[in-house]
Image (cartoon, grey):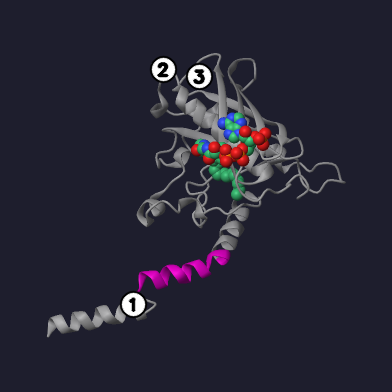
């Protein structure tokens, strides 16, 4: 009797949208534009900027938190003030924008086609995958679209150690890839890193704050060339110089024209 009931329930489940996983995911797919819109809207409310298709989770990791030291906060305040300043009357928006930053970037696009659903659902952006504030990558990116450049404030946490007391070269490369990739993606649309050249000039002390200056060099067809310098916050010390090549992998857009 019990077995017969169980079979009946199992037969019923595929036809019941409330219980069937596939049906639920199909309904979610239908709702994607709606979800993306609400994610964009809530993120706009948080950080006053437009977004590409970020996850529905609105938690913005680039907001100041208690782990930030005084220098990080001071430089942040300086750039954040530039985001509030109105440019000349002829221009609609201030030249600088603070970008929000989430631990899931492109939840619904086809980038994960080769992944199982479990991996896809657990996927997290490498630089934003720790809950403990200040432990690893604390950073915030400010974008200047008019000048096709960006600035990233980076406070390196204790989990990023390479040589004793200094930041791991791979962590530095990660930040350079992130900053240059964000700039390229922001300007032209989806990109993949094809080449990254890094010269490490002076070590970065663990726990210190540095600034990454990303700038568009040139665009040649699908190729986007970006440069990056990592310096001390007063720019007196050069830590790292890099060049990066990105290849556009999706529909390109000329966002220089878009407000
Ligand atoms: C939607 C909004 C977007 C917003 C973005 C912001 C989002 C913010 C969210 C979070 C921020 C985080 C940001 C992180 C960013 C990190 C990015 C990564 O780390 S990506 C992972 C590592 N990279 C790979 O795994 C690539 C693996 N390689 C490939 O997939 C391909 O090789 C690829 C796509 C790079 C090139 O594909 P092909 O080879 O089919 O391209 P062909 O069309 O043949 O080449 C185009 C041109 O590029 C040259 N080229 C290609 N690869 C080259 C290379 N390695 N060096 C020099 N030239 C190369 C070719 O010679 C060709 O040049 P000619 O047009 O003929 O002059």
Nearest the eye: 242 or 152: 242
Furthest toward the right, the residue is: 90
Per the image, label 1 sits on a secondary structure element best described as helix
For the residues labelled 3 and 2, the Cα–Cα distance comes to 9 Å
Q: Which residue is mark 1?
A: 14
Quarter holding the N terminus is: bottom left
Picture quadrant where residue 87 is located: top right
Outermost residue, left side: 1
Label 2 vs 1, first from the N-terminus: 1
Q: Is residue 2 above or below residue 157?
A: below
Q: Which residue is mark 3?
A: 204
**Which span of residues is magenta-colored?**
20-34
Principal SS element in the magenta part?
Answer: helix
Label 3 and label 1: CA atoms lie apart by 57 Å
Q: Nearer the viewer, residue 246 or 70?
A: 246
Residue 152 sits in quarter: top right
- Give the residue pinned by disc 2: 165
The answer to whether residue 76 of the structure is visible from this angle is no
Q: Residue at x 40, y 54 (%)?
A: 121
Q: Are marks 2 and 1 in contact (CB under 8 Å)?
A: no
Disc 3 vs disc 1: which is toward the camera?
Answer: 1
């Amino acid at each position: 009797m019990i077995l017969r009931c169980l079979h009946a329930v199992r037969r019923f489940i595929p036809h019941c949208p409330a219980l069937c996983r596939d049906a639920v995911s199909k309904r979610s797919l239908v709702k994607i534009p709606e979800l993306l819109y609400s994610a964009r809207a809530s993120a706009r409310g948080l950080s006053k900027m437009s977004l590409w298709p970020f996850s529905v989770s609105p938690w913005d990791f680039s907001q100041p938190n208690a782990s930030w030291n005084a220098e990080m906060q001071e430089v942040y305040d300086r750039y954040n003030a530039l985001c509030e300043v109105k440019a000349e009357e002829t221009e609609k928006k201030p030249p600088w924008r603070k970008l929000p930053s989430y631990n899931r970037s492109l939840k619904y696009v086809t980038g994960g086609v080769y992944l199982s659903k479990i991996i896809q659902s657990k996927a997290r952006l490498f630089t934003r995958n720790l809950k403990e504030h200040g432990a690893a990558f604390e950073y915030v990116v400010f974008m200047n679209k008019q000048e096709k450049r960006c600035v990233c404030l980076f406070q390196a946490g204790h989990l990023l150690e390479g040589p004793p007391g200094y930041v791991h070269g791979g962590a530095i490369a990660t930040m350079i890839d992130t900053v240059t990739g964000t700039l390229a993606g922001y300007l032209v649309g989806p990109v993949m890193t094809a080449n990254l050249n890094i010269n490490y000039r002076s070590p970065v002390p663990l726990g210190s704050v540095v600034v990454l200056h990303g700038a568009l060099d040139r665009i040649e067809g699908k190729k986007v060339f970006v440069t990056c310098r990592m310096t001390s916050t007063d720019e007196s010390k050069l830590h790292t110089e890099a060049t990066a090549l990105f290849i556009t992998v999706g529909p390109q857009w000329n966002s220089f024209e878009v407000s």
